[in-house]
Image (cartoon, rainbow, N blue to C red):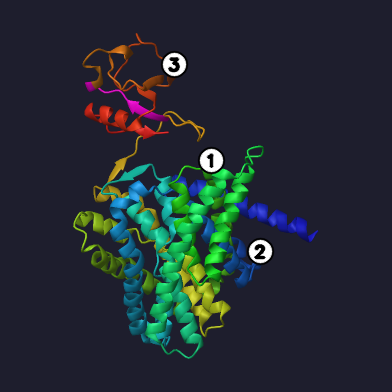
Amino acid sequence: MLNENFLLVGALLLFTAVLAGKAAYRFGAPTLLLFLGVGMLFGYNDFVSFESYDFAQFIGMVAMCIILFSGGMDTKFSEIRPVLGPGIVMATFGVILTALIVASFIYLISPYVGVVISFPMALLLAATMSSTDSASVFSILRSKKQGLRQNLRPLLELESGSNDPMAYILTAMLVSIISEGGNIDWWPSIRMFVIQMVIGVTLGYGFGRATVWVLNHINIRSNPSLYSVLLLACAFFTYSFTTLAYGNGYLAVYIAGLVVGNFRIVYRNMLTTFFDSFTWLLQIILFLALGLLVDIDELLNPDVLFMGCAVGIFMIFIARPISTIACMAPFRTFSTKARLYVSWVGLRGAVPIIFALYPISHDVANADYIFNVVFLVTIISLLIQGTTVSAMANWLGLAYEEPEQTFKLTVPDHIRSEFSEIEVNKEMLKGGDTLKDIHLPGNTLVVMVCRDTNYFVPKGYTQLLTGDKLLVVSDNNEELLEKVRDLGIQNIHKM
């Protein structure tokens, strides 16, 4: 009977979370905030009892592996190459600078909120919150049908996907220091950081290339669904082996995902669909579990409430802007508005809460206080920043509407020809308005036309109208792209 009850409660939680996610999308609220709220609601007065910090930490580890791996797979290196410099600087020095600024603020105001906190403890509290949350940023940016100018979207995704390792190293290092008496020995700590980062990058790239080779050479085409299981095993193996080798596992799985996503692999579309669904499932479970862990009464204690609100507001309006402006100062290609927007999209989410579980699992003094403050700061960040991501981009003039793709295709990976969608404009029709009058490269074929809501296969004498959507297949996509750009067509969708 216990198993049936567990499944019933689990199904109820998942069903409620999905409905909350739908409501969040309709009203413009961050979906993950509603998942967190559902967990808090069901955990209130122990309606659903869940008090295992160790199990929550394990769920967080599994979820972070998949979220980072999937995020890396969805990131095209051609998109992040122009923003590689500022992204890496913000993911490393930006995290350190944020932690130092916030720690100084916590140390200075702690006597005024009735709590005496040493500077190492203040630094630990700040370190857990020093990285932006990849799950929150990925889900919000990708759910909005809104483009961002100046390469801001790949920059924000690169930063949020790669800054968790730095925050993790800082948190683990400070937990160890405080547990051993609070004396900070900088050189061994710096050496440990460098070793973990180098091993993480090296093994992440190596395992990524090995994963590509295994997927393309192992023959299990008789049951293609097993490729998803194989890729999942490779992601977990990358994390666990890198961690055992004293490297940073989170950085390794992100790099491995980035490598896998930028090489040709078999059954890519099926694997991408599987990982998207699995990522959402893990995010829901993770946020529900974290919501169930918190005690709302403890969250509303005056010392937690005042500290959490003060730190949350300070991070949003002072610490994040200072660290962003400092890190982006050497890069002159970004406008002032772009820098302001990057400073605004510094969302906190599940990752800071997961990191706040480390002091609890290591029996650090006042660890529960750290967890509650971090939880409250996360809620404030999602409420203020998460609900205004789209509005802030519009207000700063950095947003544009991404045209919706008309043709939805699943192209087998072994087909070398590429499909694209282009929209007919007046320039294309200057030499004539029939398909045979349109001058396209010789290795290109128009296979379908969409006019309003009607789809049809064109002939050479088919008359084209401005606004028609053409599904085009080409053996030389670069030549096609160059040709259509000469015709003034900017919106080209690759299938």
* Residue 9 visible in rendering: yes
Residue 423 lies in the magenta stretch = yes
Could you say which is closer to the camera, residue 300 or residue 24?
24
Q: Nearer the viewer, residue 1 or 37?
A: 1
Q: Nearer the viewer, residue 268 or 311?
A: 268
> What residue is shown with label 2?
48
Image coords of residue 108 (percent x, y): 33, 84
Mark 3 vs 2, N-terminal side: 2
Q: Is residue 213 left or right of residue 162?
A: right
Q: Which mark is residue 266?
A: 1
Q: CA distance from mark 1 to mark 2?
A: 43 Å
CA gap, disc 1 and disc 3: 31 Å
* Residue 194 located left or right of residue 298: left
Instruction: Estimate how packed mark 3 is, as few (under 14), some (14 to 19) or many (20 or more) residues with alpha carbons within 10 Å.
Output: few
Q: Which mark is residue 456?
A: 3
Q: Nearer the viewer, mark 3 or mark 2?
A: 3
Q: Give the mark, 1 or 3, whose residue is nearer the N terminus.
A: 1
* Span colored in magenta: 418-427
Q: Amino acid at mark 3?
A: Phe
Q: In the rendered view, tell whether residue 446 sits above or below residue 407.
A: above
